[in-house]
Image: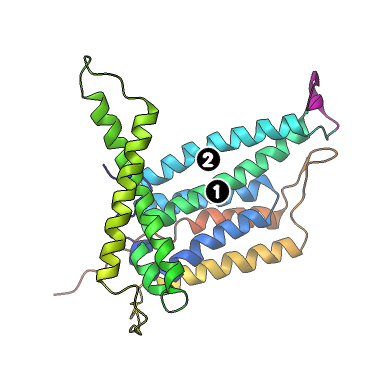
Amino acid sequence: MRAPFAYTPRPGVLQEAHPAAAIAFLASIVFVAFLFESPIVVAAAGAGAALAGLLAGARRAVLVALRLGLALLLLITVVNAIVTDRGSTILARLGDFPILGRVDITAEAIAAGAIIGLRALAAMVAAAVYTACVDPDRVLRLLRPVAGRSALTATLISRLVPLAAADHVRLREAAALRGPAAAPAGRGPLARRLLAGSLDRAVDVAATLELRGYGSSAPTAGSGERRGRSDLRLWLAAAALVVLGLGVKVAGADSFEAYPTLEIGASAPLLVLAGVLVAAGLVPLRRRGRRRRG
């Protein structure tokens, strides 16, 4: 069983494009999400990343990231509402606690926590699309001339973490199929078996890399990474998002204030930027080839 965040080779714009172009496109969406405080822009960034993942064929990764991101959003919102007593709109007074002191739940603290969680959700969706659509081997070839050892380490992590997740699923299924007479397998034995299997795989990978000469200092040839046909489209989309986001931010259209009172603005430049972010999710849409004339 393949992990939801594991890279799956499939035809698509993000899969066939140059890794630098795909990374720049997804990073531009995350950049705009972290640049603004307005929930309209942050939600639009998450929607654009999710739409791009769905069109790229990473539906399972997007759904899992949304589920995890929503749980994280709820957790951040609750924690921020408890630990922050700023804001003039008090919704509930929970009393005094030994460590936290007086706890007052305000609407402003809930809104501020929701913005942080929504930003984390957008970043998780974009990261899930990256891991599912960008080949880590091509990223390794891209970064090898700059930082060979670091690129190799990052690529191995991106490959071995999904394998460990798949091993955990298989171990749980095997433990459930042993029958009612078998002793129940707790989390401790499963964790020890998973750790032992991961260490065995790490030793095998290290031996394979040593046989292939990764430990030698001999010079290597260039990567020869090919350019995709959709690279220009991704680069233009990334540049447009960054330039438009910076322009709207400098113009002061990010009209959102959580404290002391909640103020959410919806100016025309802000709505235009939100629409462009959602429309950017259509960039990975494949174009139909033209029919040849006989």
The answer to whether residue 176 is left or right of residue 281 is: left
Which of the marked residues, 2 or 1, is nearer the chain's N terminus? 2
Find residue 289 and report its horizontal and vertical position in percent.
27, 67
Determine the residue positioned at 45% across, 70% down: 20
**Label 2 element class:** helix
Label 1, on which residue? 122
Residue 10 in view in this figure:
no
Whether residue 133 is situated above or below residue 101 in the rendered picture:
below
Seen at 64% across and 55% down, the residue is 34
**97 over 41 or under it: above or below:** above
Q: Residue 207 sits in which quadrant? A: bottom left
Mark 2 vs mark 1, CA separation in Å? 8 Å
Residue furthest to the left: 294
- Front residue of 267/124: it is 124
Give the amino acid type for the residue marked by disc 1 in the picture: Ala
The secondary structure type at the circle numbered 1 is helix
Q: Which residues are magenta?
A: 88-104
Q: Which residue is mark 2?
A: 69
Q: Is residue 175 left or right of residue 111?
A: left
Asked whether, in this view, residue 262 is left or right of residue 214, the answer is right
| Percent of width and height locating residue 69 | 52, 40
Main secondary-structure element of the magenta-colored stretch: strand
Residue at (69% x, 48% y) in the render = 38
Does the residue at mark 2 contact the one at mark 1 (Cβ under 8 Å)? yes
